[in-house]
Image: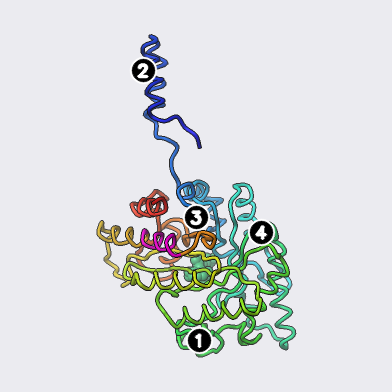
């Protein structure tokens, strides 16, 4: 937005006094002292800056909405396009909440990134009791992907097609008893569709909307080299086979103890695939050891600030411009972060506080975006 420079305004102010119109000069002085149009994340960044958004908060919390409207030029659906939300019964789709986000994105001329078409979690109860042969499973899978992608054709710019298909050791989620040793960690899709379901998910999504950019999205790639390697191998194999994949989401749920060299290594190696790179779910926990007495001290905020800045710097340095799909934070402020309810701990992982005011880490982040 254009605004008069301070020098221009000072010249007009003194000329007005000299012309003997002090009242007008007073009004001009007030304008002179008013802050210039404020810089925001989206205006400072050389690539899109996003947040995972909850349509209920968007409609009910004015501070939340104001931050989303002013700071971000990309939104990701946090939960409302996941299977359990969008496909609540075998023959029923519910697009109402996703449509709220689509309309918001369209009316604000910002990007809408869809999350996600296929995951081992957040699936509806009816799905686990679905009975059918492999053709019936395939039909169900294809119908879901193509119904959802077609509904948002022209409204959703890009999709996390498959989310978190690998265990941390780099093996594919496919069995009930898994290396991560959690009962729900096996992947319903690999078990019922075979391990090539990932490639077919991309193919089905592409058929439904050839213009949408298609991403594979996963976490902890900066910590587990086996997982990082498997993802890179899969992507390279897909490229060779002509599977329509356009990008990789590095979730980047990290904490103040996350080693920096792992972050650098993951960004560098993933960028080497030549695909678009989306830092897709960024947040930085300051309480990785789950200390119930923790205080969000200046020193914790400083550590967090320098890591937020580091992530931005590495992204700008290591990802070629044409591959920079942007940086998205997972949620908007500390108040709506998934970390508190999930781990039942105190934490302050985001750029905005519990009232959606800018935190010191916000300024570290925006400075890194600019410099
Ligand atoms: O809506 C119900 C509410 O009615 C109920 O009272 C409440 C009680 O627990 O649960 C509410 O649902 C919760 C939902 O979030 C909405 O808040 C679910 O229990 C909870 O499991 C769900 O968590 C989401 C999680 O994915 C699902 O596994 C988080 O909000 C969401 O931020 C998180 O996002 C994931 C990404 O999709 C993939 N990468 C990791 C990221 C963080 O886990």
Q: Secondary structure at mark 2?
A: helix
In front here: 109 or 353?
109
| Residue receiving disc 1 | 171
Q: Residue at x 27, y 64 (%)?
A: 294
Query: What range of the chain is rendered magenta?
Result: 309-318
Q: Secondary structure at mark 3?
A: strand
Report if residue 116 is visible in the image: no
Rendered image quadrant of residue 266: bottom left
Q: x%, y% of residue 213?
A: 62, 64
Q: Position of residue 127 (x, y in %)?
A: 65, 79
Residue 7, placed above or below residue 145: above
Is the residue 128 above or below the residue 17 in the image?
Answer: below
Give me the disc on residue 49.
3
The mark that comes first in sequence, 2 or 4, is: 2
What residue is pinned by disc 2?
14
| Residue under label 4 | 96
First in residue order: circle 4 vs circle 1: 4
Check whether the beta carbons of the residues at disc 4 and disc 1 lie within 8 A of each other: no
Q: Is residue 262 above or below residue 353?
A: below
Disc 4 versus disc 1: distance between alpha carbons? 36 Å
């Amino acid at each position: 937005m254009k605004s008069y420079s301070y020098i221009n305004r000072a010249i007009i102010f003194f000329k007005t006094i000299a012309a003997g119109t002090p009242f007008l000069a007073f009004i001009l002085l007030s304008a002179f002292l008013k802050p210039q149009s404020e810089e925001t994340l989206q205006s400072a960044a050389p690539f899109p800056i996003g947040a995972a958004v909850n349509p209920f908060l968007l409609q009910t919390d004015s501070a939340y909405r104001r931050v989303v409207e002013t700071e971000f030029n990309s939104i990701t659906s946090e939960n409302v396009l996941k299977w359990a939300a969008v496909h609540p019964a075998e023959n029923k789709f519910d697009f109402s909440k996703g449509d709220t986000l689509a309309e918001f994105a369209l009316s604000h001329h910002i990007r809408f990134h869809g999350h996600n078409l296929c995951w081992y979690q957040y699936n509806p109860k009816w799905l686990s009791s679905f009975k059918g042969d492999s053709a019936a499973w395939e039909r169900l899978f294809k119908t879901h992907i193509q119904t959802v992608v077609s509904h948002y054709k022209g409204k959703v710019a890009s999709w996390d097609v498959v989310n978190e298909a690998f265990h941390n050791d780099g093996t594919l989620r496919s069995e009930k008893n898994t290396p991560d040793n959690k009962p729900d960690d096996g992947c319903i899709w690999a078990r019922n569709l075979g391990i090539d379901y990932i490639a077919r998910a991309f193919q089905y999504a592409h058929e439904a909307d050839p213009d949408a950019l298609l991403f594979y999205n996963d976490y902890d790639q900066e910590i587990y080299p086996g997982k990082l390697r498997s993802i890179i191998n899969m992507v390279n194999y897909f490229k060779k086979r002509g599977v329509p994949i356009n990008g990789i989401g590095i979730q980047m749920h990290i904490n103040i103890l996350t080693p920096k060299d792992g972050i650098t290594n993951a960004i560098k190696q993933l960028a080497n695939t030549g695909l678009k790179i989306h830092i897709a779910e960024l947040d930085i926990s300051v309480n990785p050891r789950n200390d119930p007495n923790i205080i969000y001290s200046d020193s914790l905020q400083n550590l967090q600030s320098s890591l937020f800045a580091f992530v931005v710097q590495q992204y700008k340095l290591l990802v070629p411009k044409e591959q920079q799909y942007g940086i998205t934070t997972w949620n908007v402020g500390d108040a709506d972060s998934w970390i508190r309810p999930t781990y039942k701990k105190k934490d302050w992982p985001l750029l905005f506080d519990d009232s959606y005011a800018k935190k010191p880490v916000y300024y570290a982040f925006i400075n890194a975006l600019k410099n």
